[in-house]
Amino acid sequence: MTSSSLPLPTDPHSYAATGLLRAQHLRLALTVDFAQRTLAGTATWLLAGGPAGGPAELVLDTHGLLLEAVQLGEAANGPAANYHLAPANTVLGQALHIWVPAGTAAVRLTYRTVPEAAALQWLTPAQTASAHPFLFTQSQAILARTWLPCPDSPGLRFSYEATVEVLGPERGQLLALMSAENPQATAPDGRYYFRQPQPVPAYLLALAVGRLDFAPLSGRTGLYAEPAALPRAAHEFAELEAMVAAAEQLYESYRWGRYDLLMLPASFPFGGMENPCLTFVTPTIITGDRSLTSLVAHELAHSWSGNLVTNETWNDFWLNEGFTVYFERRIMEHLYGRPFAEMLQVLGEADLQHTLAELGPASPATHLRLHLAGRDPDEGLNDIAYEKGCLLLLTLEQLVGRPRLDAFITEYFAHFAFQSMSTDRFASYLTQTLLTAGEATRLQLPTWLDGPGLPAGAPVAQSARFAAVGVALAQLAAGTPPAGLHPITKEWSSQEWEYFLRGLPPTLPATDLARLDAAFHFTASGNAELLAAWFPLALRAGYAPADAALEAFLLRVGRRKFLVPLYRALLAAPGGRARAQQLYQRARPNYHSVATSTLDALVLG
Ligand code: BES
Ligand code: ZN
């Protein structure tokens, strides 16, 4: 058969065909070379399907890989395969077409990555706390193809095993970890073996190598971090087992064996990434008081919504993130009570309103179902999936009550475990198994999925704890000096301070900021969320005492969610453009490509 008779891929961001010949198991053998900044080795794909034993074509996604050989079978001396590497698309990379004769069970690809591979961040010893080199991957959304040839669609799953060998003089001190069963100690010879027995989509492939120690948190949970950072982080995440137990009480058992965290250097571009068995997490949620750990609950929740039941394409991203935000807040409510979860919900809704206003009332980018064909998903994915998706689930909660919704979600995860889900199939499953005809009419699902903004009657959260913050803000506005608010602010958590900072008039003069700073020490705060909310106020007012802290923050932290608004605020300040560009040039080597691809356009463009 020829390529034109293969079924068309239904994922606009992957060339890998969805039918007939499937890559169902990966054997990866890689060396990690810090000196050359390359991964090199082989990816062997075990195949299934094929038209009744006849020949077929296997299509894999690649992006910037240096392909050295393609062979049939698993053996190192197997016959060369016929293949064709299609012309490059700037977003999607290159389709690799491999001609697979009848009866062939595997194809073996020998390749290496380029130093600029977009998924990979190679850190020099000077960029880490441990003064050792560090490597980590970020594969979501379509970057797995920049570090291995693979079927890079969330609708295609495979199990994997990998051998990873760390090269160089430091090999005996560097630990390698993957989204799989992991070692807990460094191997003197730098060789590691990994196994992920469950089928996973390519965006959940992950690798990290660095000077890492392990601390157990319970029998099945633990934490990896650079040695100097480990004790403080272990204290911060001490409640990890309680989170897993809470999640299991809500939606049935955790299906991935161990659940560990890897705390990365601060250059990690996201808050967290739900790599199976091993969530990657930013150090910017370490506060000392455990008040930002809802982010861990979020990544944990993805072990069900996302990793078990996976969005079929990036157009269905809300199925991953909307469910996960809802689930995350249920975990937090279970552990810390309703008033705490209500604060998270109010902050999330405020973020949503902000994004809706930015995108505009008629924007298709505000629909739950996205149309990202022809675009880079990294640019098209926004807050809407998270918070509007969560509001749809809260609407269902109000409509049918928690007991019915929880039973539905439990059954949904069990029924579609290790499968992918499209928005359409979800809609029909929902209407067939949960809703009565009357309820379906009241819900107006099509408006949620394919309409802009928020449907009328979407729930609006209230928080009693934030009402108290409102009182403090009102007193401040009425002339009470900041120091006079201490009786009210004494017990505040990160969320109350965040709400307070967001509630301040955006154009307070520097003299007022100085008084606030003297009373509450924002500039000296170790809490990244508070710093990120404080610096824009300081920039707008020209409050110079915050300058050094802002600079240090931008040089150290690579989390895009913080960087984008901070550089925007910097650019908007008087004389800010030159300052932003100078600072960015210094900070840029510490940022991952996911961050620089956004910031290059913003700061240099
Ligand atoms: N899976 C996402 C991160 C992601 C999304 C990476 C899309 C690449 C493309 C992760 O679960 C996530 O949502 N992280 C958030 C934190 C969360 C608490 C909202 C983040 O990194 O800020
Ligand atoms: Zn998420």
Image: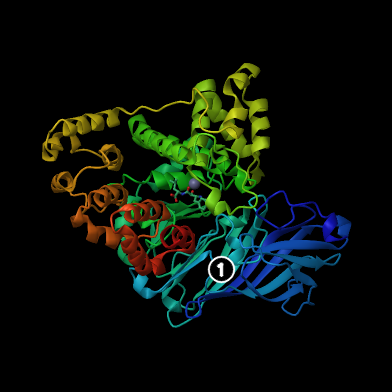
Relative to 176, does residue 237 appear above or below in the rendering? above
Give the camera-side residue of 534 and 467. 534
Q: Secondary structure at mark 1?
A: strand
Where in the figure is residue 334, as x and y percent of width and height? 40, 34
Residue sitting at x 36%, y 66%: 587
- 209 sits to left or right of 197: left
| Location of the C terminus (image quadrant) | bottom left
Q: Residue furthest bottom?
A: 169
Give the camera-side residue of 468 and 411. 468
Q: Tell me if I can see residue 566 in this picture.
A: yes
Residue type highlighted by circle 1: Tyr
| Location of the N terminus (image quadrant) | bottom right
Q: Tell me if I can see residue 241 in this picture.
A: no
Relative to 129, does residue 601 appear above or below in the rendering? above
Q: Quadrant of residue 43?
A: bottom right
Give the camera-side residue of 397 and 354. 354
Residue sitting at x 43%, y 68%: 185
